């Protein structure tokens, strides 16, 4: 089987608040049509049964578009739904244990909030890391923003793929790209958008523009 490639640029994560009449799957489909090239299922206050049902629905969608699907926190759900991997926080199962369970063919991403955590995840065999929250965000309340300073440090020192996350919108994404990010993750900017596909397309264009001359 082999690990799916993770040359993603725009990473979309499911949110909690969808516009009335829109489903998680329909919004993620719009995100993919706009250019999101990896999807993560993240749901903090959801039963495991419900999470599994959502994972199956997103598995069907992401297979159709040939986009990797990752599951936040829940390795068992990732395995059951045949997801491509997991994304783990600093408080979740340690990377080494996750790797032992998941094997080499699945993607493991790790949230990091400082350069020490980044280098530890890299040394431990993470496939990519999250770098954030760059800006304060209601999606992950109570966590201090790391600012673009950490993005700059990651760009200088991290050798595995890293994705900037946290409070990133079309209004501030240029500063994040300027600081050296080549991959961007957004939750509320896409999920809360009136036009998720257009928003994703605009993010992707900015990312491409920076990478063309960066
Ligand atoms: N993880 P939004 S910040 C899920 O820093 C998540 O690890 C973060 O959502 C981290 O794009 C974050 O709505 C929230 O700010 C991202």
Image (cartoon, grey):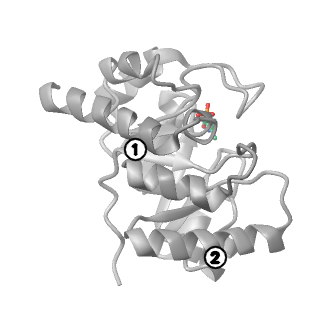
State yes or no: discs 2 and 1 in contact (Cβ < 8 Å). no
Q: Position of residue 131 (x, y in %)?
A: 49, 33
Question: Residue 126 or 3: which is nearer the viewer?
Answer: 3
Figure check: 170 above or below 63: above
**Location of residue 174 in the rendering, given as x and y in whole percent from the top left corner:** 36, 19
SS type, badge 1: strand
Q: CA distance from mark 2 to mark 1?
A: 22 Å
Quarter of the image with the C terminus is: top left
**Residue 29 bears which disc, if any?**
none
Q: Is residue 193 left or right of residue 171?
A: right
Image coordinates for residue 176, horizontal then vertical, percent: 40, 21
Label 2, secondary structure: give it: helix
- Ligand 1 shows up in which quadrant of the image? top right
Residue labelled with disc 1: 10
Mark 2 sits near ligand 1, with its Cβ under 8 Å away = no
Residue shown at the point (52%, 33%) measured from the top left: 165
Pointer 1: residues within 10 angstroms few (<14), some, or many (20+)?
many
- Residue at x 36%, y 49% (from the top left corner): 35
Q: Nearer the viewer, residue 38 or 198?
A: 198
Q: Quadrant of residue 175?
A: top left
**Looking at the image, which residue sits at the far left?**
213
Corner quadrant of residue 7: bottom left
In the image, residue 177 sits, relative to residue 25, either above or below, namely above
Lower position in the chain sequence, tag 2 or tag 1: 1
Query: Is 35 placed left or right of 142 in the picture?
Result: left
The structure residue drawn at horizontal position 82% and vertical position 74%, both measured from the top left corner, is: 49
Numbered label attached to residue 56: 2
Q: Is residue 42 left or right of residue 119?
A: right
User: Residue at left 51%, top 47%?
Assistant: 12
């Amino acid at each position: 089987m082999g690990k799916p490639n993770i040359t993603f640029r725009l990473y979309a994560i499911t949110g909690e608040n969808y516009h009335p009449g829109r489903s998680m799957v329909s919004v993620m489909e719009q995100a993919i049509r706009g250019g999101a090239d990896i999807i993560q299922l993240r749901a903090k206050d959801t039963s495991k049964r419900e999470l599994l049902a959502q994972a199956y629905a997103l598995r069907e969608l992401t297979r159709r578009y040939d986009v990797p699907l990752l599951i936040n926190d829940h390795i068992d759900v990732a395995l059951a739904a045949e997801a491509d991997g997991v994304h783990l926080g600093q408080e979740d199962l340690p990377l080494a244990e996750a790797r032992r369970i998941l094997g080499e063919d699945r993607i493991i991403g790790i949230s990091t909030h400082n350069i020490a955590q980044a280098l530890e995840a890299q040394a431990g065999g993470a496939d990519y890391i999250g770098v954030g929250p760059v800006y304060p965000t209601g999606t992950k309340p109570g966590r201090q923003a790391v600012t673009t300073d950490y993005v700059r440090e990651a760009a200088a020192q991290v050798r595995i793929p890293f994705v900037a996350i946290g409070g990133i919108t079309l209004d501030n994404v240029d500063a994040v790209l300027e600081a050296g990010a080549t991959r961007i993750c957004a939750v509320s900017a896409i999920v809360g958008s009136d036009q998720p596909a257009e928003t994703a397309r605009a993010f992707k264009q900015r990312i491409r523009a920076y990478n063309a001359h960066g």
